Image: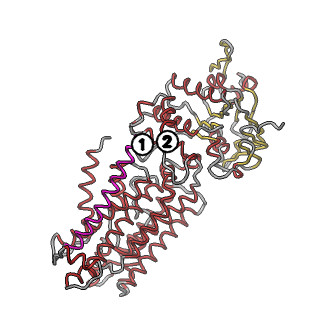
């Protein structure tokens, strides 16, 4: 039984890997200027070519990589937060990290900084909120999920108010950029490779502890009675979840929904074994966000939709469908 | 020849909650084959004491030795092969199959990169059969009743195969025949050389299974000794604040509220 389930899960992992390659191919070739398979290969191999090759290499590839990486980051961070808080409703933003990033990014935009300056400010804001929530919730040395969750939710709503204030003060010309940042937008991601590297490193860092995470999901007492150092493990999960989220929102803005829904979808398919759930969520998140981003720039082209809107529009019905089919 | 160390030893152990003491100056020794039942009113600190004995929370003072060594002196993870804790049931937020849930007891025996194998599965299935849950192996834990979940939790503990069993209300939610079956099984394990410490609320089951009794008065005082010495109608009436009468029944005493 155990072996059977595991074989099914490995098949799913391989299927997801194929899906990642498929969605990457779609993302590189689709758009207002369709690119043939031959040009695609030339571009990826670094060869010389016409405008198609330039478009793929300089526009579509960074954007596709950013979407893949950030989808994986958000889904992985969401799976980690759900274990950390032992709450299936947790997502990467529940502890206020995206709120902090939004305050940083919008503040920078308001001051006239764009691009790199806004990214640095977003990352700084995310880390600032991470430390603030950790300090406030962990101040007495204990690790109460409720306290952590409450602190995060309150700090997040404070950030939300600050964001609303900045939007209301912002001049007309800057509002659209700010709104796109808030909804999540991969079009401005020009250096996506750090996000992909962080995703791979983050997964590698937490994977050795995956079986211990299974125990942590069953409760602190259970885990400790079976020999897990829960204090250290939870600090690692919190820190890593925060870092992954901060990198993702810095790269593509606060794309909603991926971090909440993808771990659930994967859990419905293969159960809650973190050794399979963490890599499968990363891959599925990558597929979802990259697919959504490609759809966002092609469906009503030349208008580009914010990708966060599409992830929700795709995710909600799929999720409800699977939930209704899943036996209670 | 030096005798093997007892399974659990406390010397002048003091356990405290933020505002009060659970016990002070507790000296006890648990040998293989012995069953210690902890009794006391609600809120006397029975679970707190049990968690302290499991090494999950620090004692205020005194010494606590598991098989002759303090918890901090055991290499990390080894203590989980020696003592197991059945905590009071907690809600499950994520679904998992019954078999997966029983398999968590194998965690201390598996290397970091190892996956549960067929032998681990055989151990888990045997434990599930022991608590009458063999046919439920593929079911989801969230669809079980409270008593069934409790039996799965007991199976997970049996899978852990420790020397010292620490049981917090092991028969909570169980039907009468399962109560007796579970306690009989722990008695068998004790006869095979394990030590058992359990919190019970039923005085008559305590009288039936305990070799020793620790009675907490809720104000830091305690009485510890062989079961026949501690289980007296007068002492128990005082401890629980309600008059009790002892009625002989064969070789045991039955305690009946007046």
Residue A17 in the figure: left or right of residue B23: left
Residue assigned mark 1:
A2
Residue at left offset 23%, top offset 76%:
A40
Please tell me the numbered disc located at residue B148.
none
Closer mark to the observer between disc 2 and disc 1: 1
What color scheme is it?
A: secondary structure
Residue at left offset 48%, top offset 45%:
B116
Residue A183 vs B41, above or below: the answer is below
Name the foreground residue: A21 vs A304. A21
Q: In the displayed image of the protein, which residue is found farthest to the right?
A: B1
For mark 1, name the chain: A
Residue at left offset 54%, top offset 54%:
B112
Residue A25 vs B8, above or below: the answer is below
Q: Is residue B47 magenta?
A: no
Residue assigned mark 2:
B103
Determine crowd level at label 1: few under 14, some 14-19, many 20+ residues with C-alpha closer than 10 A: some
Name the foreground residue: A133 vs A172. A133
Q: Where, quadrant-wise, is the C terminus of chain A in this rendering?
A: top left
Q: Where, quadrant-wise, is the N terminus of chain A in this rendering?
A: top left
Q: Position of residue A281 (x, y in %)?
A: 37, 58
Determine crowd level at label 2: few under 14, some 14-19, many 20+ residues with C-alpha closer than 10 A: many
Cα separation between marks 2 and 1: 10 Å
Residue B241 vs B52, above or below: the answer is above
Residue B69 in the figure: left or right of residue A192: right
Residue A203 in the figure: left or right of residue A190: right
**Marks 2 and 1 belong to one chain:** no
Q: Position of residue A289 (x, y in %)?
A: 29, 66
Does the CB distance between marks 2 and 1 fall below 8 Å? yes
Question: Which quadrant holds residue A70?
Answer: bottom left
Q: Which residues are magenta?
A: A1-29
Q: Position of residue B93 (x, y in %)?
A: 43, 47
**Secondary element at tag 1:** helix
């Amino acid at each position: 039984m155990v072996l059977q389930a595991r074989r099914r899960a490995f098949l799913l992992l391989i299927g997801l890997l194929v899906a990642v390659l498929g969605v990457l191919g779609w993302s590189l070739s689709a758009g207002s200027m369709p690119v043939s398979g031959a040009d695609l290969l030339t571009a990826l191999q670094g060869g010389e070519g016409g405008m198609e090759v330039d478009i793929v290499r300089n526009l579509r590839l960074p954007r596709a990589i950013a979407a893949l990486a950030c989808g994986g980051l958000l889904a992985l961070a969401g799976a980690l937060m759900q274990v950390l808080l032992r709450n299936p409703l947790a997502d990467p933003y529940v502890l206020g990290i995206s709120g902090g990033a939004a305050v940083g990014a919008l503040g920078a935009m308001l001051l006239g900084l764009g691009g790199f300056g806004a990214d640095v400010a977003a990352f700084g804001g995310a880390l600032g909120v991470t430390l603030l929530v950790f300090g406030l919730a962990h101040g007495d040395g204990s690790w109460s999920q409720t306290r952590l969750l409450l602190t995060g939710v309150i700090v997040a709503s404070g950030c939300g108010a600050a964001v609303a204030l900045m939007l209301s003060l912002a001049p007309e010309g800057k509002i659209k950029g700010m709104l796109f940042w808030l909804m999540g937008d991969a079009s401005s991601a020009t250096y996506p490779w750090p996000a992909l590297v962080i995703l791979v490193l983050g997964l590698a860092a937490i994977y050795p502890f995956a079986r211990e995470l299974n125990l942590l999901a069953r409760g602190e007492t259970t885990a400790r009675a079976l020999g897990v150092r829960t204090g250290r493990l939870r600090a690692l999960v919190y820190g890593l979840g925060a870092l992954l989220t901060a990198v993702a929102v810095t790269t593509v803005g606060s794309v909603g929904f991926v971090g909440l829904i993808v771990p659930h979808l994967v859990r419905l398919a293969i159960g809650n074994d973190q050794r399979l759930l963490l890599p499968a969520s990363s891959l599925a998140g990558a597929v979802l966000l990259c697919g959504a981003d490609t759809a966002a720039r092609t469906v009503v082209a030349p208008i580009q939709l914010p990708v966060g809107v599409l992830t929700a529009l795709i995710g909600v019905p799929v999720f409800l469908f699977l939930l209704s089919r899943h036996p209670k | 020849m030096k005798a093997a160390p007892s399974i659990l030893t406390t010397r002048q152990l003091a356990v405290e909650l933020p505002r009060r003491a659970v016990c002070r100056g507790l000296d006890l020794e648990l040998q293989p084959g012995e069953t210690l039942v902890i009794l006391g009113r609600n809120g006397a600190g029975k679970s707190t004491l049990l968690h302290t004995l499991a090494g999950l929370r620090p004692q205020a003072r005194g010494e606590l030795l598991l098989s002759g060594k303090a918890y901090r002196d055991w290499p990390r993870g080894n203590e989980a092969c020696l003592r197991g804790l059945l905590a009071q049931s907690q809600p499950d937020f994520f679904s998992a199959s019954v078999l997966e849930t029983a398999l968590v007891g194998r965690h201390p025996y598996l290397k970091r990169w190892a996956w549960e194998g067929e032998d681990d599965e055989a151990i888990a299935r045997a434990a599930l059969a022991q608590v009458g849950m063999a046919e439920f192996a593929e079911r989801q834990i969230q669809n079980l009743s409270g008593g069934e979940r409790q039996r799965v939790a007991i199976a997970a503990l049996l899978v852990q195969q420790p020397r010292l069993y620490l049981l917090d209300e092991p028969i909570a939610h169980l039907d009468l025949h399962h109560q007796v079956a579970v306690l009989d099984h722990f008695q068998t394990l004790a006869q095979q050389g394990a030590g058992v410490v359990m919190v019970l609320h039923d005085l008559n089951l305590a009288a039936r299974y305990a070799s020793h009794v620790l009675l907490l008065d809720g104000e830091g005082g305690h009485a510890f000794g062989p079961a026949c010495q501690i289980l007296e109608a007068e002492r128990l009436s005082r401890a629980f604040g309600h008059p009790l009468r002892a009625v002989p029944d064969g070789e045991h005493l039955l305690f009946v509220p007046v």
